[in-house]
Amino acid sequence: MESNTQKAIDYSHEHIQEFIDSLIDFLKIQTLSSDKSYKGEVRKGAEWLAAYLKRLDVQDIRIIDTNNNPIVYGSLHQAGEDKPTILIYGHYDVQPPDPLDEWMSPPFEPTIKDGILYARGSSDMKGQAMVSLAAIQSILAFDKMPVNLKFLFEGDEEVGSPSILPFLNEYKDLFKSDFVLNLDAGMVAKDMPTIVYGLRGLAYFEILVTGPAHDLHSGLFGGIVYNPIHALSKLIAGMKDEHGKIQLPGYYDDVLPLEKKERDELNALDNPDQYYIDEMGAKAVFGEEGFSNVERIGARPTLDVNGIWGGYTGEGSKTVIPSKAHAKLSMRLVPNQTPEKVRQQLTQYMQENAPKEVSWEIKQLSSDPAYLTHIDSKPTRCFIQSLEKVMGKKPVFKREGGSIPISTHFQNLLGCESVMSGFSLPGDRVHSPNERLDLELFEQGIEVIIDYFYRVAQECGD
Ligand code: BES
Ligand code: ZN
């Protein structure tokens, strides 16, 4: 007799076009969390998810308001109290699509070419959210869910989840589960199924340097005033030396060295420089001396300027000495560093290095610490088995460079560890023009998750 797992898998293949069509619908909604003028669209994204959950007969569906964008909640308890409850995590917001003229097809008009779906959010992470929903739908076509489920979809992940901590604190009983399944962490390569066991944190700042109280004629005043753009540029330039070492005072003090075993395991996943050069389209790789690329990405902290502006940038010329210069600056953090301490280090650097002729202020935009999980937990062991069974290869274990701020709060407030993986590739151009999703992986992902739900039901119950 055909097993229920196989029946659901067969169903998922037969209905794959339906799932892709639903995903396309979802991708058309412009859920930009960074831009307040898109609030209505973001809410539409939440409503779309709530409606989809309703189709799956999920109970107690709620769109809960927060100080920012709403959270979609639901629960599907069909498996009985002896079976585990998995919290399915996802985010329905996306990053801004600019620069728009670099897209081959418009970012919110999903387009399929050669088995690849192009759209903002296709890989990060509406496509990943759809993997779970499609897996559940395939099982429910002729069975009960073998595990209990809760859902949490947030609309602020891409802006650092600023209101998630008070929210989860208030609703911790509602979201109480045994563990979290988070498919927002990706995989190393198409033939390398991946368990992600570490994420970096993020400390994000905006710096404002002010010179004169208002813009000045550069002829009348040029030569007697400190230009704030010049001051800011020098400050930023000094934050890293030519070997890629960050110069904020004490920046590396809390960074724990990798143990030899972990270092060796991570380095087994490294690629030659040329791989990264091709992925990035850059002339060369550049990073902290003494570390491999995979270590620099997953296990070492960074500092990057994300944007810098000020003065006149329109067409033609304007002879002006600007009053203000701005920069957005962020640090990816590793375990044991804290965003608060990094803020102090940045402040100290500014105090010690900013010229006395200008004034400055720092605003902190997001602060989330790094997150590490245990790869030998039962839920993760089951995921390893499902990946191996469906994808035909043992997964690799990776520390990733990106951040998912809610992970730490799941751990600290709900006591829930996250199983982190996903079906997005390093070449998917996430956060960049022409974001893409490999539809073959999407289909395989659904199979993995179906297998996983049945496997967890058998192996993780009471
Ligand atoms: N999916 C990413 C996180 C990610 C990227 C995990 C690569 C593993 C590998 C997520 O959507 C994301 O982009 N997060 C932001 C969070 C930030 C705004 C606090 C990030 O990492 O920039
Ligand atoms: Zn993202």
Image (cartoon, grey):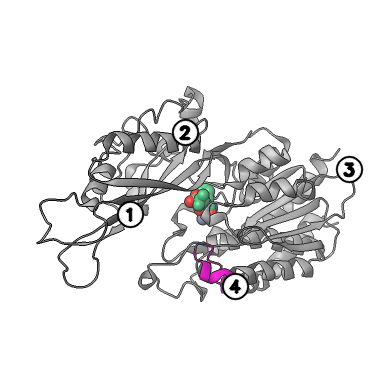
Q: Nearer the viewer, residue 380 or 348?
A: 348
Find out whether residue 39 is within the magenta segment: yes
- Going from the N terminus, do you reach mark 4 or mark 2 first? 4
Q: Using the numbered discs, state the Cα–Cα distance from disc 2 to disc 3 in whole angstroms.
A: 44 Å
The disc labelled 3 sits on which kind of residue?
Asp
Q: Is residue 280 left or right of residue 235?
A: right
Q: Is the shortest distance between ligand 1 and the CB of mark 2 under 8 Å?
A: no
Q: Using the numbered discs, state the Cα–Cα distance from disc 4 to disc 2 in whole angstroms.
A: 37 Å
| Secondary element type, mark 1 | strand
Q: Is residue 109 left or right of residue 179?
A: left
- Magenta stretch: give its range: 25-41
Callout 4 touching callout 1 (CB < 8 Å): no
Q: Residue under circle 4?
A: 40
- Going from the N terminus, do you reach mark 2 or mark 3 first? 3
The disc labelled 1 sits on which kind of residue?
His
Q: Residue under circle 3?
A: 82
Residue positioned 69% across, 58% down in the render: 132
Q: Residue under circle 1?
A: 326
